[in-house]
Amino acid sequence: MTSAAMHIARTGLDAQDTRMRVISNNLANVNTTGFKRDRAAFETLAYQTVTAPGAQSTSETKYATGLNLGTGVRVQGTARIDTQGSLNTTGNSLDLALDGDGFFQVQLPGGQLGYTRAGNFSRSAEGLLVTAEGYQVMPGITVPEGATQITIGNDGTVSATVAGQTEPTQLGQIQVASFPNGAGLQPTGDNYLTETAASGAANLGIAGQDGRGKIRQGMLEGSNVNVVEELVDMIETQRAYEVNSKMISATDDMLKYVNQNL
């Protein structure tokens, strides 16, 4: 008797442990602005073909099904679920939310561009529109000193009342980035994603056009994590882990019986 069943159960433990880690991260970020939940995807490991379907069983007949033994499971990858989170009113004129698809573009340290759904922006000492970490929102928007009544339209147009003028002055326009495959973006932490070969190149455009979401001023997008759904997935993962653990114990008992009695 071999320990193949024990090895297969071990791969199940590893896979369920990884899934639990994904669920744990989702629950930890339930209140993170613009966070998108992840889902673990599984795939089978290579099969051991003992008898191939259609192989000759006799000189006149063939096997109808064959004999193929699986060798376990592994996590194929994690998929980000990009459903819309709830839009929460903050009243802050520089808090922005995307109602629909797309990302805000910011310049990360070193000149690399990052993309985010978290629009909790503020104004730097130089008047630039920046993130909480001080990264500049691109394309750059400069708010003059003493400007009041900052207004950001659904299309990203930024205007403000400048001292000495009665009519609002247009300061620029915030653009929204879209990707051929947004799921292929690489998460880097701090609510930022970066472009990869899988995501394709960023396509900047006006909010509300060509499938891009509209910009909502004075609002922030909440996490799309559903706590009840995550708890159900957690219980399911825990039960699957326990079953694989019992499989190892059962296989160990079988091997022990063989060693002691045969």
Image (tube, grey):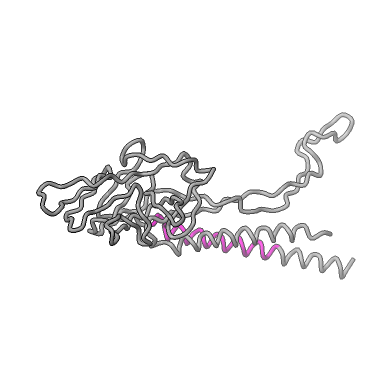
Near-viewer residue (33 or 18)? 33
**Image point (56%, 58%), residue name:** 19
User: For residue 2: magenta?
Assistant: no
Q: In the figure, 256 relative to 83: above or below? A: below
Q: Quadrant of residue 49?
A: top right
**Where residue 205 sits: x, y (%)?**
35, 39
**Image point (79%, 38%), residue name:** 52
Of all residues shown, which one is farthest toward the bottom? 260
**Image point (27%, 52%), residue name:** 142
Query: Number of labelled discs?
Result: 0
Q: In the figure, 202 relative to 218: above or below? A: above
Near-viewer residue (199 or 86)? 199
User: For residue 240: magenta?
Assistant: yes
User: Is residue 63 found left or right of 73 in the rendered image?
Assistant: right
Q: Which portion, as a residue range, is magenta?
A: 223-247
Of all residues shown, which one is farthest toward the top? 60
User: Is residue 211 found left or right of 57 in the rendered image?
Assistant: left
User: Is residue 225 found left or right of 143 in the rendered image?
Assistant: right
Near-viewer residue (129 or 42)? 129
**Where residue 120 sits: x, y (%)?**
32, 58
Image quarter in which the C terminus is found? bottom right
Image quarter in which the N terminus is found? bottom right
**Where residue 23 sits: x, y (%)?**
51, 60
**Where residue 69 sits: x, y (%)?**
75, 48
Q: Quadrant of residue 18?
A: bottom right
